[in-house]
């Protein structure tokens, strides 16, 4: 591409002639982390982490929530929150210690030599600026291209590089006009704007459906191979790490407990905690366990017939749901899968009456919405949201949040509501004494339990779970799934379980429905849909699921031949 800095490739490996004894050329180290220690208000969050990263290398950091992996990533760029600071160790980038650099010198390197791709692109991108303007700002920040036309040309090159169609025209669009996967691609383009040597990706595919996730992982792999950019991927999804990273660090309580090649750690983990993480990962090959929890009733509780939902104006109409038919029986878990934009969340919101349908029929206990059925459904059909932090009011306590539906439906007096809240918190595995704490005082998994308690408050018969575990690490995810299975068994709930992780969906569902462009293209028993899909789109979704096996790990290259030096005290 004209005017672009030539790609940085790792030094090539010299293959000696037969009988020659010349040594291989070692790849150069671009990032060296030594005994990194980070504390928040005197409490150690990262304790003695160390590793070397060579040009073109790929390194994964895994561990459950609170293990210190995201804190480590932020410390690499010295982007810690105000109450966090590096208390020991060094982060050397091309010979300069980022941990000790004065702020002006650090700003000159951050975004130019080392860059970060954040987890939530919609929160990270400025909603009021066009994508072109944001790319222009990233280029101007380091003075790489003083000419405005050259910056515009470079912005088009970057969008082309990350696979945004019609790049020149899309520069004028705002973030909300892109899909979730495209917004993540724009985040990667911003990180690559100044040809960074090291790219740190913090949960880059969380909450993305399998096909979009696969596209992002392929993009990161292609950029790594083409430009020689070293890649650090932080993820709670071991399948993502298996597909992307050649080497792996396992973190727990702020320390590295195990390191090595991805293939080694996936097939022969040495540390008990690594084995624990692997055991908690849902496997696509595992048969459904839903039948052991409940037996669906014969008569449908919720029936949807020909449901349509359109958005737009006279000039442009978008059809989100186009003639959806489905049934949900008492005691049944129906899994709903499909890529972003297929209509999954729109369907969930129509069922809880947040969105009014444009056509079709919804019946609850045989009564149609609009003819009395909606009144019963308003209390008996409840929704568990995807993001347990965004869906909880930060100003309210856990007890107030849980009691809110009781107040809304006029259930009980103050004393009865207080008793019910204590029962609900205990039912979802939380200490009733924590009712006076705010959401920020709970972990991600605990916040999701509060969301479930709130949904259970009015004693529903139908629970709609919209991506309830997508943002949780595998061990917490397993706990929440076990909780939902127990609640269904004890309360006889019907569950519509919406998720992009097909392994999780198979594990919890009696039946699976596949939604594509607003239409149900396939429905059947969970095991049959996964093992013998009838529709090509279902097969495409299954093919995109990251597999947790050594074969999925990227092949080693010359850049990966240097050993990852673990200098942690763990």
Image: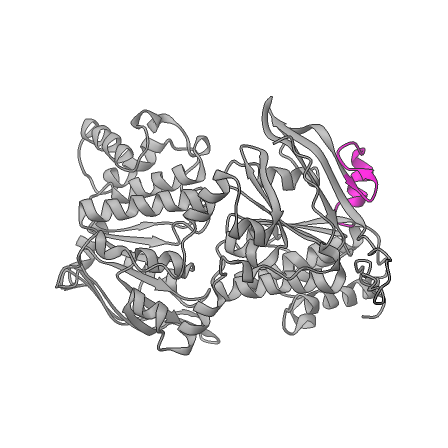
Give percent across and percent down for residue 190: 69, 56
Total residue callouts: 0
Tell me the quarter of the picture where residue 79 sits: top right
Picture quarter with the N terminus: bottom right
Instruction: Please report the residue visible at 42 percent of the width from the left and 78 percent of the height from the top.
Output: 536
Residue 280 as seen in the image, left or right of residue 235: left
Q: Nearer the viewer, residue 106 or 223?
A: 223
Furthest residue toward top = 42
Is residue 45 covered in magenta? Answer: no
Up/down of 359 relative to 570, above or below: below
Picture quarter with the C terminus: top right
Residue 220 as seen in the image, left or right of residue 393: right
Magenta range? 92-112
Residue 28 as seen in the image, left or right of residue 357: right
Give percent across and percent down for residue 178: 56, 64
Q: Nearer the viewer, residue 355 or 274?
A: 274
Instruction: Please report the residue visible at 35 percent of the width from the left and 33 percent of the height from the top.
Output: 398
Residue 276 as seen in the image, left or right of residue 356: right
Tell me the quarter of the picture where residue 56 sits: bottom right
Q: Nearer the viewer, residue 541 or 145?
A: 541
Give percent across and percent down for residue 450: 34, 38
Specify the color scheme.
one colour
Q: Is residue 134 visible?
A: no
Q: Is residue 324 visible?
A: yes
Up/down of 569 relative to 462, above or below: above
Give percent across and percent down for residue 16: 84, 64
Is residue 99 covered in magenta? Answer: yes
Up/down of 104 relative to 300, above or below: above
């Amino acid at each position: 591409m004209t005017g672009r800095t030539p790609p940085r490739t790792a030094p090539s490996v010299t293959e000696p002639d037969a009988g020659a004894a010349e040594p291989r050329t070692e790849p150069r180290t671009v990032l060296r982390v030594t005994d990194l220690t980070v504390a928040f208000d005197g409490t150690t969050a990262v304790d003695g982490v160390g590793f070397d990263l060579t040009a073109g290398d790929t390194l994964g950091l895994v561990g459950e929530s609170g293990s210190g992996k995201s804190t480590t990533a932020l410390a690499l760029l010295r982007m810690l929150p105000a109450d966090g600071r590096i208390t020991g160790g060094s982060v050397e980038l091309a010979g300069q210690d980022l941990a000790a650099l004065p702020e002006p010198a650090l700003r000159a390197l951050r975004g130019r030599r080392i860059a970060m791709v954040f987890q939530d692109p919609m929160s990270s991108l400025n909603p009021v600026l066009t994508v072109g303007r944001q790319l222009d700002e990233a280029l101007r920040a380091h003075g790489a291209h003083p000419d405005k036309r050259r910056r515009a040309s470079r912005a088009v090159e970057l969008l082309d590089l990350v696979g945004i169609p019609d790049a020149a025209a899309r520069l004028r669009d705002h973030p909300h006009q892109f899909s979730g996967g495209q917004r993540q691609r724009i985040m990667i383009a911003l990180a690559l704007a100044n040809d960074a040597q090291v790219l740190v990706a913090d949960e880059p595919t969380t909450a993305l459906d399998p096909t979009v996730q696969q596209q992002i992982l392929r993009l990161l792999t292609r950029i790594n191979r083409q430009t020689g950019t070293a890649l650090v991927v932080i993820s709670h999804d071991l399948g993502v790490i298996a597909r992307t990273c050649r080497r792996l660090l396992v973190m727990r309580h702020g320390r590295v407990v195990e390191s090595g090649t991805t293939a080694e750690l996936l097939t022969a983990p040495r540390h008990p905690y690594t084995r624990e993480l692997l055991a908690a990962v849902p496997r696509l090959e595992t048969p459904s366990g839903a039948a052991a929890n409940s037996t669906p009733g014969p008569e449908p509780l919720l029936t949807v017939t020909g449901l349509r939902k359109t958005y737009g104006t006279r000039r442009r109409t978008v059809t989100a749901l186009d003639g959806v038919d489905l049934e949900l029986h008492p005691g049944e878990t129906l899994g709903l899968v499909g890529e972003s934009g297929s209509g999954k969340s729109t369907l969930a919101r129509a069922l809880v009456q947040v969105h009014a349908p444009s056509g079709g029929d919804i019946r609850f206990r045989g009564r149609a919405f609009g003819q009395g059925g909606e009144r019963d459904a308003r209390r008996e059909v409840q929704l568990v949201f995807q993001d347990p932090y965004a869906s909880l009011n930060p100003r309210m306590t856990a007890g107030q949040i849980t009691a809110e539906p009781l107040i809304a439906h006029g259930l009980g007096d103050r004393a009865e509501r207080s008793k019910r809240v204590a029962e609900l918190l205990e039912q979802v595995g939380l200490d009733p004494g924590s009712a006076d704490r705010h959401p920020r005082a709970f972990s991600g998994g605990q916040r999701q339990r509060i969301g479930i308690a709130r949904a259970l408050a009015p004693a529903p018969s139908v629970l709609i779970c919209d991506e309830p575990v997508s943002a949780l690490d595998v061990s917490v995810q397993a706990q929440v799934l076990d909780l939902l299975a127990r609640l269904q068994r004890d309360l006889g709930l019907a569950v519509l379980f919406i998720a992009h992780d097909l392994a999780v969906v198979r594990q919890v569902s009696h039946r699976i429905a596949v939604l594509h462009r607003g239409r149900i293209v396939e429905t059947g028993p969970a095991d049959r849909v996964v093992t013998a899909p009838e529709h090509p789109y279902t097969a495409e979704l299954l093919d995109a699921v990251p597999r947790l096996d050594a074969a999925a790990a990227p092949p080693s290259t010359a850049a990966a031949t240097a050993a990852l030096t673990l200098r942690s005290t763990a």
